[in-house]
Image (cartoon, grey):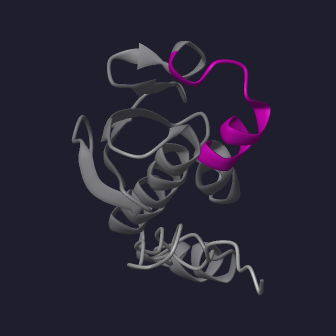
Amino acid sequence: MADKEIMATGRRKTAIAVVKLVKGKGRVFVNGKTFKDYFGSRAALEMMVYRPLALTDNQEKYDVRVKTVGGGVTAQAGAIKHGISRALLKINEDYKSVLKSEGLLTRDARVKERKKYGRKRARKRFQFSKR
């Protein structure tokens, strides 16, 4: 698979990340910026994104190029993590047991519940006054 880019899509909440894995030195580019420039110095998000690469010993082998839209920064980082995991699975099917046991291949389907009529939010009610 020399000089071939592997693509996969990751999703979380309303964030969508299209991930391309290219042979490289382990750098991550998000929307044309470096990881630090895009997400700032959030160590938790960095650990989240690099987790699939670290588990499969590919941290120094691939550069990650991501185009992400929608959601917030945490949801986008989760979508990138999901996309990287799916791309690694395309590279080598043997990674499936490791990634699946860590829950990295499962799409986090939790989304914000819609607002209901007659209520303030999805479940919060207006203040009740007995008298």
Q: Residue lying furthest front in this view?
A: 131
Q: Residue 46 vs residue 116: left or right?
A: right
Count of labels in the image: 0
Query: Magenta stretch: residue 45 in it?
Result: yes
Magenta segment, prevailing SS (helix, strand or loop): helix
Instruction: Tell me what residue is drawn at x 67 percent, y 48 percent.
Output: 48
Query: Magenta stretch: residue 66 in it?
Result: no
Query: Is the residue 38 above or below the residue 102 in the image?
Result: above
User: Residue 9's x, y, as percent?
Assistant: 29, 57
User: Residue 22's x, y, as percent?
Assistant: 33, 36
Instruction: Tell me what residue is drawn at x 47 percent, y 60 percent.
Output: 82
User: Residue 126's x, y, as percent?
Assistant: 62, 72
Q: Residue 129: which quarter of the image? A: bottom right
Nearest the eye: 98 or 80: 80
The C terminus lies in which quarter of the figure?
bottom right
Q: Residue 35: which quarter of the image? A: top right
Query: Is the residue 45 above or below the residue 13 in the image?
Result: above
Instruction: Tell me what residue is drawn at x 26 percent, y 50 percent.
Output: 6
User: Residue 5's x, y, as percent?
Assistant: 24, 42
Instruction: Tell me what residue is drawn at x 51 percent, y 50 percent.
Output: 75
The segment highlighted magenta reads 38-49
Q: Residue lying furthest bottom in this view?
A: 130
Query: Is the residue 60 above or below the residue 107 in the image?
Result: above
Q: Residue 99: which quarter of the image? A: bottom right
